[in-house]
Image (cartoon, rainbow, N blue to C red):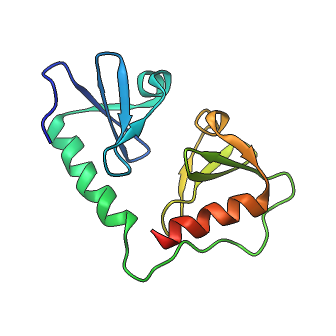
Amino acid sequence: MKFPPDTRFSLYVGLPLSSSGGECVAWDRPGGRSFPKELFDSNGSPCTEEEFNRAMAEWDNKKTIKGVLVALPASFPRGTEFGDYEGLPLTDFAGQSTAWDRPGGRWFSNNEFFSKATPCTENAFRALVGQVNEE
């Protein structure tokens, strides 16, 4: 992948990000998707393009583990919130956010990312995870 010379690279909980010309992109799906610049600036860990490319390869390997589906608990603790961030199923409980886009999920120590999600019901959340498993 070729990036403009002014591109900055960052990792956000293992998620490879790039920023150029005021636009930030998360590279967790083909073609990337828009990512909040304020999260890139405040919580991203700056990295080199080489580290970014390595994270891209690792992301692809982790995301598709042949035959291993994202398994959810039968129930979540009372008070768990559910969200949808551009098709990414998220939960938040007591300030601990989890993205359920790969087996075992990914944990976030703060809920800044979760606050950008559209709230949804547990049933809608489970349907999103079902879509992840079909990909």
Image coords of residue 12 (percent x, y): 42, 39
Q: Position of residue 82 (x, y in %)?
A: 73, 51
Query: Is 96 placed above or below 21 here?
Result: below
> Would residue 47 be found to the left or right of residue 32 on screen?
left
Q: Residue at x 51, y 60 (%)?
A: 101
- The location of residue 79, given as percent across then percent down, is 85, 51
From this viewpoint, which residue is outermost toward the bottom? 67
Depth check: 130 or 69 in front?
130
Residue that appears at 79% across and 54% down:
121
User: Measured along the vertical axis of the image, is residue 54 above or below residue 2?
Assistant: below
Looking at the picture, does residue 16 appear above or below residue 98?
above
Image quadrant containing the C terminus: bottom left
Quadrant assignment, res 40: top left
Side of 135 where 11 appears, left or right: left
Q: Which of 10 and 120 is in front in this view?
A: 120
Going 55% across and 44% down the picture, which residue do you hit? 86
User: Quadrant of the image for the N terminus?
Assistant: top left
Q: Is residue 44 visible?
A: yes
In the rendered view, does 120 fall on the left or right side of 14?
right
Look at the image and tell me whether residue 104 can be seen: no
Q: Please state if 99 lies on the left or on the right of 28 as rendered.
A: right
Q: Quadrant of residue 71?
A: bottom right
